[in-house]
Every structure is written in C-alpha cells, then in structure tokens.
Image: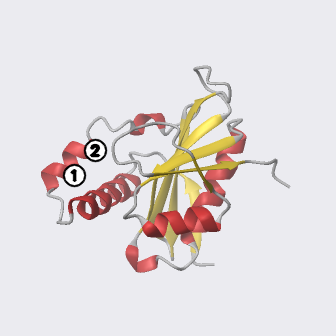
Amino acid sequence: MPWTVTPERFDSPDAALLRRDYYDEVASRYWERPATAEEIDEGLTDDGAALLTPPTGEFVVGRFDGKAAACAGLIVKGTADGASGPGEVAELTRVFVRPEVRGTGGGGLLLAAIEDRARALGVRLIRLDTRNDLVEARGLYAKHGYLEVPAFHHRMYAEHWFAKELGATV
C-alpha cells in the first residue's frame, strides 16, 4: 500500500511544510492569485495549531510512497450540550492532500485515521466548515459520511458546515 497515515506533531518539519502548503492553497484559491510568503507566514502565526496535540486535539500526516503528502487536524471543542472543556465534539481542520496525489485514496485514509484518534479522545461528533471553492473537500466529506448541516458558527470564510457522528470501532 503506497499510503501510511500516522499521528505526528504539528510542528515537525514535514507537518510544518504540509500546513504551509495547505494555507498557500486555500489562501491562493480564495484570493484568486498566488499567496505571498508574507501572507502565508501571517496566516500561520497564532493559528491555533498548538491545540492539535492531545488532550486538546491531534494531527496526522499521510505519506505516499514514504513522502509527506497529506495532513489533517482535530481540535476537541466541548460537550454535545455546549458546556466548555474537553468533551464529545471536535472540529476537523487543515485537511490537505497534495494535488499530485489526489484521487489515490489518501483523503479517505486521513479521515479514517482522524476519526480513530477522535474516538480515542472520547469524541462522538466531528464537525467542520469549508468554502464554496473547496469542491474537492466537500466531495471528500460527503463520500465519507459527513452530512451537510445548518451553520453552527458564523466565522469568516465558512460557507458549508458538515458533521459526522462517530460510532464505536468494530
């Protein structure tokens, strides 16, 4: 199998480069022009990535034929009843597959790995938001059981909201 997906610190060299490439792509698509290095640096500054470590979250890196090619993050948000603190609801974030390996199954493996890590953290519901222009992401989420739901926040750049209830692993 050419893909492996494992937890990794968000600030490892491979993870940091994947996060940078993710931000470059989403910013460039939004602005409809290449993002500058300064804009990417600014976007990554204080972006909350430190939450992508247990017990507040997780980060996974996918490798295609041994090369870092994909990533996804999870941030535990709270309980289903809205109480603050670690709990049953988490947000999926920073899902990225390098364009040259899209369509090879990496996205589904990323989601499966994040869902397994979420269950280990006691998460029962994963939510996410995305934009109109990120059609590949919306297709990936729908293909893997994420349902479009009403808005659960009103952050800038969010145009579609998805959620998936996690059952126990079999």
Q: Is residue 93 visible?
A: no
Instruction: Tell me the residue at 67%/42% (across/down).
Output: 125
Q: Secondary structure at mark 1?
A: helix
Q: Position of residue 147 (x, y in %)?
A: 64, 56
Which residue is painted at 52% across and 48% down in the image? Answer: 128
Q: Is residue 53 left or right of residue 34?
A: right
* Discs 2, 1 touching: Cβ within 8 Å: yes
Instruction: Tell me the distance, in whole angstroms, between the alpha carbons under discs 2 and 1.
Output: 6 Å
Q: Is residue 68 left or right of residue 150?
A: left
Classify 99 as above or below 49.
Answer: below
Task: Decide which of 156, 10 is in the foreground and name it.
Answer: 156
Q: Position of residue 74 (x, y in %)?
A: 54, 44
Outermost right residue: 170
Q: Report if residue 4 is visible in the image.
A: yes
Question: Whole-percent x and y of residue 155?
Answer: 38, 39
Crowding around mark 1 (Cα neighbors within 10 Å: few <14, some 14 to 19, many 20+) is: some
Quadrant assignment for the N terminus: bottom right
Question: Which label number is shown at residue 44?
Answer: 2
> Which residue has dot 1 on it?
40
The three-letter amino acid code for the residue at tag 1 is Ile
Q: Is residue 82 above or below residue 169?
A: above
